[in-house]
Image (spheres, rainbow, N blue to C red):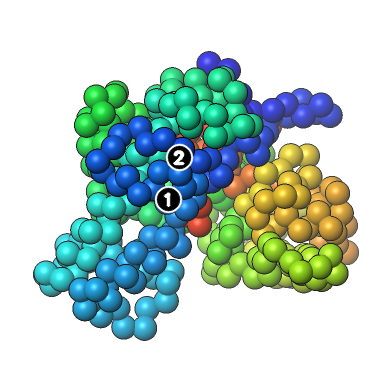
């Protein structure tokens, strides 16, 4: 089945994911099943399901039921809810059950909308043609990754998804869960794009955090995986009052990226030599080193240069005093590369929004 979301570069014939593959701005114009949560009709997919909305629901239910979260920051609350599902405290369990049921149903309704392709939903997504909807209709497997897909949360979401499809009398996607999704982007990139008998620095620049690791590959497999401490994603603002502000924030983000890669590379050298190629998974639609200039916190890096990978190569080569090559890969595509042996599947990362990659993409 031809994937309408995958494009081929005219320069080197490399495949890459088009930005129209995004689910975040799709609109649920018509619910595929009524009587579950009718109030979400008309909202975008990102407004219906995201980590920030999940966290806000936890805060609301905790306040309503008198559940004490202490001084836990927002990023810890999904884990708190996950543990609360099996808590001996009745109110903690009630809080978690209510939130997980709501968002499990929402996830089921969104996937059902993709599967059924109602006319109203097709018309609300102007950049999708019938081939896009038919692809989702015929897709076999959906792989759920990310923090909200792990542990008990993921298993409960899977139960609610199946219940939604059963209620609609529609054959469901095969839902696969991947618990340990922290380094999945790093692993996917390294597994598919690193040459044998090398050690390389591999990074995953997400919207909220940066994952780093030194990976050694031998005989076609990852032989050693040495993680470094994760770092926060900074300078991720995406809306600006002026072009001057946008340019200023782009420079600050670029400098932070260069400093992060440089320090990570030097840290990796402590344990042995590294190749001159740095592999980067980034939360942006990218191909041939060029970033998408319209979406997300990394889009403003286009202000630094049209070919951002080449800009990074020049600055990193100067900082590290050796010839550095940079390979940029769309983050959800990087995750999908890890599951390249699974046919006819989409990999959905449940994070700040929906990240989507497809396992049938071919990247060399």
Choose top left, top right, bottom left or bottom right for residue 57: bottom left
Observer able to see residue 327: no
Dots 2 and 1: beta carbons under 8 Å? yes
Q: Disc 1 designates what residue? A: 48
Along the viewing direction, whichever of 248 and 119 lies nearer the viewer: 119
What is the quadrant of residue 111 in the picture? top left
Instruction: Give the total of numbered labels.
Output: 2
Q: Assign the C terminus to one quadrant of the image.
A: top right
- Label 2 secondary element: loop
Nearest the eye: 257 or 148: 148
Estimate the x, y position of residue 188 in percent, counting from the top left. Answer: 55, 43
Lateral position of residue 146 relative to residue 363, left or right: left
Residue 361, above or below 27 = above
Please tell me whether residue 345 is drawn above or below residue 71 in the rendered image.
Answer: above
| Residue at screen point 66% across, 65% down | 236
Point out the residue furthest to the top here.
Answer: 1
Residue 317 relative to residue 121: left or right: right
Q: Which residue is mark 2?
A: 28
What residue do we see at 40% from left, 39% from top? Answer: 110
């Amino acid at each position: 089945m031809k994937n309408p979301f995958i494009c081929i570069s005219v320069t080197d014939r490399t495949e890459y994911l088009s930005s129209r593959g995004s689910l975040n701005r799709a609109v649920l114009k018509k619910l595929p099943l009524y009587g579950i949560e009718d109030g979400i009709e008309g909202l975008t997919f990102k407004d219906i399901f995201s980590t920030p909305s999940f966290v806000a629901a936890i805060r609301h239910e905790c306040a309503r039921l008198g559940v004490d979260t202490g001084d836990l920051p927002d990023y810890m609350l999904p884990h708190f809810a996950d543990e609360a599902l099996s808590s001996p405290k009745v109110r903690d369990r009630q809080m978690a059950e209510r939130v997980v049921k709501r968002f499990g149903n929402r996830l089921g309704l969104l996937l059902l909308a993709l599967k059924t392709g109602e006319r109203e939903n097709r018309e609300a997504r102007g950049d999708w043609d019938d081939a896009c909807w038919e692809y989702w209709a015929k897709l076999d497997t959906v792989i759920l990754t990310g923090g909200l897909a792990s542990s008990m949360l993921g298993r409960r979401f899977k139960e609610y998804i199946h219940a939604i499809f059963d209620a609609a009398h529609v054959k469901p996607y095969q839902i696969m869960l991947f618990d340990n999704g922290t380094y999945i982007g790093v692993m996917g990139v390294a597994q598919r794009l690193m040459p044998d008998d090398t050690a390389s620095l591999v990074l995953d620049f997400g919207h909220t955090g940066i994952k780093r690791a030194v990976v050694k590959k031998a005989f076609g497999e990852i032989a050693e995986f040495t993680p470094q401490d994760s770092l926060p994603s900074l300078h991720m603002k995406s809306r600006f009052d002026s072009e001057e502000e946008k340019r200023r924030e782009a420079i600050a983000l670029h400098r932070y990226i260069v400093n992060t890669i440089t320090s990570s590379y030097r840290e990796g050298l402590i344990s042995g030599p590294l190749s001159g190629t740095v592999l980067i998974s980034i939360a942006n639609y990218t191909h041939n080193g060029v970033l998408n200039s319209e979406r997300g916190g990394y889009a403003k890096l286009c202000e630094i240069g049209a070919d951002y990978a080449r800009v990074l190569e020049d600055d990193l080569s100067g900082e590290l005093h050796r010839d550095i090559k940079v390979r940029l890969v769309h983050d959800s595509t990087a995750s999908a590369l890890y599951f390249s042996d699974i046919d006819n599947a989409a990999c959905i990362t449940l994070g700040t929004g929906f990240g989507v990659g497809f396992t049938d993409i071919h990247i060399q």
